[in-house]
Image (cartoon, rainbow, N blue to C red):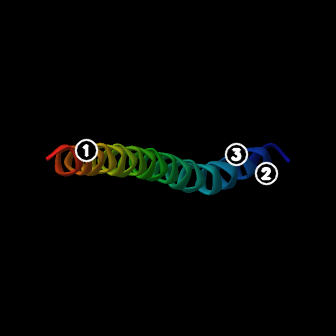
């Protein structure tokens, strides 16, 4: 009976360690995706501002 508790602990660790590593990788990946999405949104906003400035300059001439 005593040795079964040790085996259960080892099996639990064998299952939990890879799951934890997978969770960490997924979290890091999603963080990078959020940063890229934010950068793309900032780029689009700057592009729209520039288009507005160009349009205003063309209309004023």
Labelled pair 1, 3 in contact (Cβ < 8 Å): no
The residue most toward the front is: 61
Of marks 2 and 3, which one's residue comes earlier in the chain? 2
Residue 13 % position (x, y): 62, 48
Q: Going by the image, does 56 lie left or right of 25?
A: left
| Horizontal side of residue 13 vs 49, given as left or right | right
Are there few (<14), some (14-19), or many (20+) residues within 10 Å of tag 3?
Answer: few
The mark closer to the camera, 1 or 3, is: 1
The residue at which mark 2 appears reads as 4
Q: Residue at x 42, y 51 (%)?
A: 37
The mark found on residue 9 in the picture is 3
Q: Which of the 4 quarters of the picture holds residue 35? A: top left
Foreground pick, 6 / 39: 39
Taking depth in this image into account, of 21 and 6 the one nearest to the observer is 21
**Circle 3 sits in a helix, a strand or a loop, which is it?**
helix
Distance from disc 1 to disc 3, alpha carbons, whole Å, reads: 70 Å
Foreground tag (1 vs 2): 1
Name the residue at 34% across, 51% down: 44
Badge 2: residue crowd in 10 Å (few <14, some 14–19, many ≥20): few
Left or right for 41, reference 19: left
| Mark sitting earlier along the chain (1/2) | 2
Kindly state the secondary structure of the residue where label 2 is placed: helix
Helix, strand or loop at mark 1: helix
Relative to 39, 34 lies left or right: right
The earlier-in-sequence mark between 1 and 3 is 3
The span from disc 2 to disc 3 (Cα, nearest Å) is 9 Å
Q: Position of residue 7 (x, y in %)?
A: 70, 52
Instruction: Report the residue marked by disc 1.
Output: 56
């Amino acid at each position: 009976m005593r040795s079964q508790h040790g085996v259960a602990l080892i099996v639990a660790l064998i299952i939990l360690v890879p799951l934890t590593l997978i969770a960490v990788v997924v979290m890091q990946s999603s963080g990078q995706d959020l940063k890229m999405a934010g950068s793309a949104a900032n780029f689009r906003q700057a592009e729209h501002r520039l288009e507005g400035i160009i349009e205003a300059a063309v209309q004023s001439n």
